[in-house]
Amino acid sequence: MSTVTQTSAGQAAVKTAFGMGRTVRLGLSRIGYETKIYFRQTDTLFFTFLFPVIMLTIFSVAFQGLGNVGVNADGTGGISQAAAYLPGMIAAGILLSGVQNLGVDIATERSDGTLKRLGGTPLPVLSYFFGKMGQVFATSILQIALLLLVAVVAFGVQLPTDPAKWMTFVWVYLLGIATSAILGIAISRLPRTGKSATAVIIPPVLILQFISGVYLQFSLLPNWLQTVASIFPLKWIAQGMRAVFLPESFASAEPGGGWDLGAVAVALLIWLIAGLVICRVTFRWIRKDS
Amino acid sequence: MPRSVRRRLLLAGDQRQHGVMTSNDIAVSVQNLTKTYGAFAALKGVTFDIERGETFALLGPNGAGKSTTIEILEGYRDRSTGDVRVLGVDPQHGGLPWKAKLGIVLQSSGESGNVTVREQLTQFAGMYPNSRDVNEVIAAIGLEEKANTRIKNLSGGQQRRVDVGLGVIGRPEVLFLDEPTTGFDPEARRQFWELIRSLKREGTTILLTTHYLDEAAQLSDRAAVVAGGKLVDIGPVGSLGSAEARIPIVRWRENGIVREQRAADPGAVVAALVARLGEPAELEVVRPSLEDIYLELVTEENAEAEARVAANQAETIKLITENEIA
């Protein structure tokens, strides 16, 4: 009788010791660790962190001569090239920080033995995910802050003053970055080796940027290409960011004739849930041989 | 399998049946373990137990099945058949509380290493309920001066010491070491041996695979020799090999020819020689080294395997010929 009580008490102790509190604590500790490593890798720093800032600068400078975008017939109004590119670059940054960064990072960790080592420790998979997502979160906020700073200081872009616009920014950002991070974890299964990771993940991410209204104005694309792009999340993140940073007069240029934020929310939620299911089903510390 | 081995294995089985060893005394239990990859049988029925607090070495040539065995025990690979328990748990279903009691040093690691030795050990220490002090571990692996160096900037041997440090940081009950001292210089190896002895004194159960027989002799209470996916011998290192294999050799030169004689009583042989020849030229009495015994064990198994392959081929040829005639 006493042994039974002891055992159940022991089990309860084990349950508490290895419960959700520990998972969260370890997850938080991994955020700092992962973020530190992120900023020590010069290649990711360039290709995911600084890339949107560099592209914004290049496009803004290169197309300055073309004058403002969305000018009225009488030559007044419109916004600068930098202001026109800013929402797309923020959206691209969200995609790069999540999908590209985590896709390559986790594929590399799977192939170089990092995940195998972690798989032999009592680290919960969830804590590992928290660490990665926290790192994505922290780095992408810094990235957007840098983008806004460059846009305002170097190119004189006017940021929205309406609090409602910033509320939109907050939820589009949160939904966008969560979806992007989860999809990054999901896509990391695809590359067979760490060496092929960048070759497998960067091309589709780059193509998405071209067809989703980041580098090319979305309304200029043929209808069928718009339809293809609408399947993927980047188009919706970019649309949401345009709703925040472009004047209301630009809404009519959207394919649906408006910002259509409801569709943005639905599309991103579907991708987020699909990504969570894929991660839950496919994530393994190592490829077991049987 | 040499007869002596079979006897010892049977004895172990008898003890279990009669309840001499209880499950509490046994940290690792492996029964008739097999592992096949397609048509290739990497393990063909391996059986051994490791008692709590024991240091146990797995010896054997490359490809013998050492790493497959240890990775099945660590939960990284699934077995094909047989039964395996580590601390009473089937590794295929080992949860986090189970993993918290293990320390694992894998055979190779190629992590990018963008963290310092101290940062990495601190991060891993946080995962265990009862971890060791980070500074103590840094001292034990002899990396005090490199504590704030990024791991990628360390030498291969120093990185290996970090691996060992990460394996012991959680104060494991069972420590797995897969070729831990590869790339160590002699001093680092001595230091590592000292570390393992101190872990043993604390009661840690240790399973180690190694190519260095002196290491097995220095550290392990018992060793098993694996060859061709089978256990060819098991026992205290000093008792490995058949009794015949450990008989000393008396060697001398007579009439210009080197002669040798295996004798359980070399003194008597030498006395007889002296009586017959006076002082024998180039006289020596050699006890077969662990290396000699090990090589004999492994070669025996290889020869048997080759014989089996040859027999199979002969059989196949015979069948083909018969078919052709028919």
Image (spheres, rainbow, N blue to C red):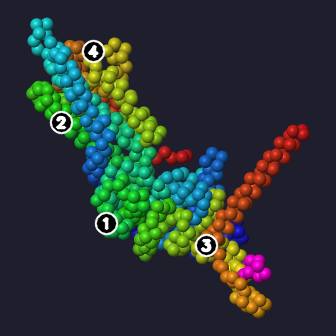
Sequence-wise first label, 2 or 4: 2
Disc number for residue A164? none
Measured as percent of width and height from the top left, residue B324 is found at 87, 39
Q: Are marks 3 and 4 on the same chain?
A: no
Chain hosting mark 3: B
Magenta region's main secondary structure? strand
Tell me if residue A66 can be seen. yes
The residue that label 2 is drawn on is A145
Q: Secondary structure under badge 2?
A: helix
The residue that label 1 is drawn on is B144
Measured as percent of width and height from the top left, residue B162 is found at 38, 60
Q: Nearer the viewer, mark 3 or mark 2?
A: 3
Residue type (three-letter) at the residue carrying disc 3: Leu
> Magenta span covers which residues?
B252-262
Real-space Cα distance between discs 3 and 2?
67 Å
Real-space Cα distance between discs 1 and 4?
61 Å
Q: Are marks 2 and 4 on the same chain?
A: yes
Alpha-carbon neighbours of circle 4 within 10 Å: few (<14), some, or many (≥20)? some
Q: Are marks 3 and 1 on the same chain?
A: yes
